[in-house]
Image (tube, helix red, strand yellow):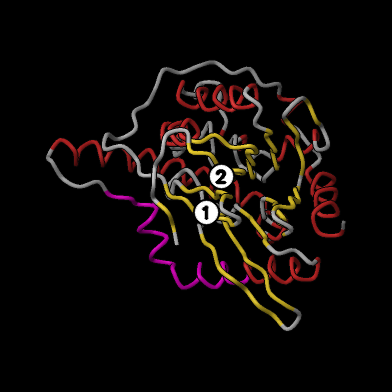
């Protein structure tokens, strides 16, 4: 069950957000910023695809996106411990896995023990066959989604002029392939659950597939509670731990459509962005699955 309460300064032990895709046109950074300002967590888990390096451009990084990063820094300064778990869109940061600096740590996975129960967290791209066998196809899909987002904004701007309701082209497309997506999602969830049960975890939390959920999954060896934190492109969801349990939270966006902000130059070295994908993936696979 998704909770929709919005309380300023709400105390939670842990908050998990993923797939914010900062630097991409579809990112709902303003809503994410509002959410981050509304909570006071002991720990904040950024579960992958936080900065969309695949779509990153020096000509596009709006102030609202930068404000999210500043807010996270402020939270660290106030004592919140931030865990950055790397995803596929920000896989360039995997070269920094193991780094711990003040209240910031960068890893492939995280295991938290809360109220005598163990929670296993990782982004989820480790189980994405398309991502690792045909990465070019995944990147092409990401750019296609960005173009669709721009078209969608233009259409919604026109609709607003005539007092019509907004539409979501991406959501309509996803609905058209609902059955196929359901099968892929079920396979993903079961794969994660089976391995979590084998490792003896009580909870397993992922992102990656942009499908917020909380469910109990069983197999012949036991059971685990599977959660997915969704995204901040369409669903605007997070996972929060309080009252001895994990809760799925859904943010209610403002009424005004998100507007393009002033552009900020962001200098990123091409040499820095180039990475040995196979080596980084193998290291991440061993870290998440085998250890």
Q: Which mark is residue 210?
A: 1
Q: Is residue 182 left or right of residue 282?
A: left
What residue is shown at x 46% (from left), y 20% (from top)? 63
Q: Answer with mark 1 or mark 2, whichever residue precedes in sequence.
A: 2
Q: Which residues are magenta?
A: 167-187
Query: Which picture quadrant has residue 84?
Result: top right
Determine crowd level at label 1: few under 14, some 14-19, many 20+ residues with C-alpha closer than 10 A: many
The quarter of the rendered structure image containing the C terminus is bottom right
User: Percent position (x, y) of residue 158?
Assistant: 20, 38
Main SS category, magenta section: helix
Q: Is residue 143 left or right of residue 272?
A: left
The residue tagged 2 is 19
What residue is shown at x 70% (from left), y 42% (from top)? 86
Q: Whole-Å distance between the Cαs marked 1 and 2?
A: 7 Å
The quarter of the rendered structure image containing the N terminus is bottom left
Residue 221 or residue 167, whichever sits in front: 221
Q: Indicate yes or no whether the magenta region holds residue 184.
A: yes
Q: Is residue 133 above or below residue 16?
A: below
Residue 178 or residue 97, whichever sits in front: 97
């Amino acid at each position: 069950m998704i909770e929709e309460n919005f309380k300023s300064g709400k105390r939670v032990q842990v908050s998990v957000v993923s797939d914010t895709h900062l630097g991409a046109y579809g990112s709902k950074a303003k809503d994410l910023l509002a959410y981050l300002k509304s909570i006071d967590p002991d720990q904040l888990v950024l579960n992958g695809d936080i900065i969309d390096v695949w779509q990153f451009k020096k000509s596009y990084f709006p102030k609202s996106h930068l404000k999210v990063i500043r807010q996270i820094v402020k939270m660290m300064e106030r004592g919140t411990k931030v865990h950055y778990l790397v995803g596929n869109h920000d896989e360039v940061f995997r070269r920094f896995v193991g780094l711990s600096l003040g209240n910031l740590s960068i890893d492939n996975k995280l295991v938290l023990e809360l109220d005598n129960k163990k929670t296993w967290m990782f982004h989820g791209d480790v189980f994405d066959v398309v991502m690792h066998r045909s990465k070019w196809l995944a990147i092409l899909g990401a750019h296609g989604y960005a173009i669709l987002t721009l078209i969608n904004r233009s259409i919604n701007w026109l609709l607003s002029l005539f007092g019509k309701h907004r539409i979501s082209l991406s959501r309509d497309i996803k609905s058209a392939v609902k059955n196929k997506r359901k099968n892929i999602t079920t396979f993903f969830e079961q794969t994660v659950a089976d391995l979590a049960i084998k490792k003896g975890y009580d909870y397993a939390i992922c992102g990656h597939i942009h499908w917020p959920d909380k469910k109990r999954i069983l197999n012949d060896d036991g059971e685990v509670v599977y959660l997915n934190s969704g995204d901040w492109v369409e669903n605007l969801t997070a996972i929060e731990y309080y009252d001895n349990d994990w809760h799925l939270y859904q943010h209610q966006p403002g009424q005004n459509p998100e507007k393009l902000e002033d552009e900020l130059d962001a200098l990123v070295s091409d040499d820095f962005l180039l990475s040995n994908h196979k080596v980084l993936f193998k290291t991440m696979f061993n870290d998440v699955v085998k250890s």
